[in-house]
Amino acid sequence: QVQLVESGGGVVRPGESLTISCEVSMSLSKITAMAWYRRQAPEADREFVAQILYNNKRDYAESVKGRFTVSKDNSRDTVFLKMDDLEVADSGVYYCKISPRLDPRDYWGEGTQVTVSS
């Protein structure tokens, strides 16, 4: 059973920075894609935020490009999302998703809450 545990969420003010983490219970070397999504309201769908592939190729949603940075540490089997210049609109529950190389299923974490408020 693959498990993902997000951490690092919290309450920050607009313009501040925050880094959230996703610890994975399998080797990142066996994963094709690692992504971050967020749900900004209970009734909303999860929206794509950022992704890093096994070869370190990165993609970002337009709304976070230039402010957020996704990275990974293979030695710790952990994926990070560094969020700079946070805006109130960035508030929500952030979820980590992985797509293993030899498994057709995606796996999700339980999420971590990020609140940006003045």
Image (tube, rainbow, N blue to C red):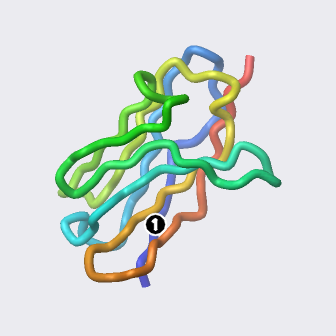
Which residue shows up at 49% across the image and 23% down it? 17
Of 57 and 96, nearer the camera is 57
Q: Identify the residue at the far right of this view.
A: 43
- Quarter holding residue 106: bottom left
Of 59 and 80, nearer the camera is 59
| Above or below: residue 114 compared with residue 42 | above
Q: Is residue 76 left or right of residue 13?
A: left
Inspect the image, locate mark 1, and give the three-letter code of the amino acid beneath it.
Leu
Which residue shows up at 39% across the image and 81% down it? 104
The spot of residue 22 in percent (x, y) is 42, 55
- Quarter holding residue 27: bottom left
Q: Quadrant of the C terminus?
A: top right
The spot of residue 77 in percent (x, y) is 28, 60
| Above or below: residue 41 compared with residue 105 | above
| Above or below: residue 86 compared with residue 5 | above
Which residue shows up at 71% across the image and 43% down it? 40
Q: In this view, does 59 lie to the left or right of 56?
A: right
The spot of residue 67 in percent (x, y) is 45, 23
Judged from the image, the secondary structure of the residue bearing numbered disc 1 is: strand
Label 1 crowd (10 A; few <14 / some 14-19 / many >=20): many
The residue tagged 1 is: 4
Q: Is residue 86 left or right of residue 79?
A: right
Q: Quadrant of the N terminus?
A: bottom left
Q: Identify the residue at the far front of this view.
A: 62
The spot of residue 63 in percent (x, y) is 54, 29
Which residue shows up at 28% across the image and 48% down it? 72
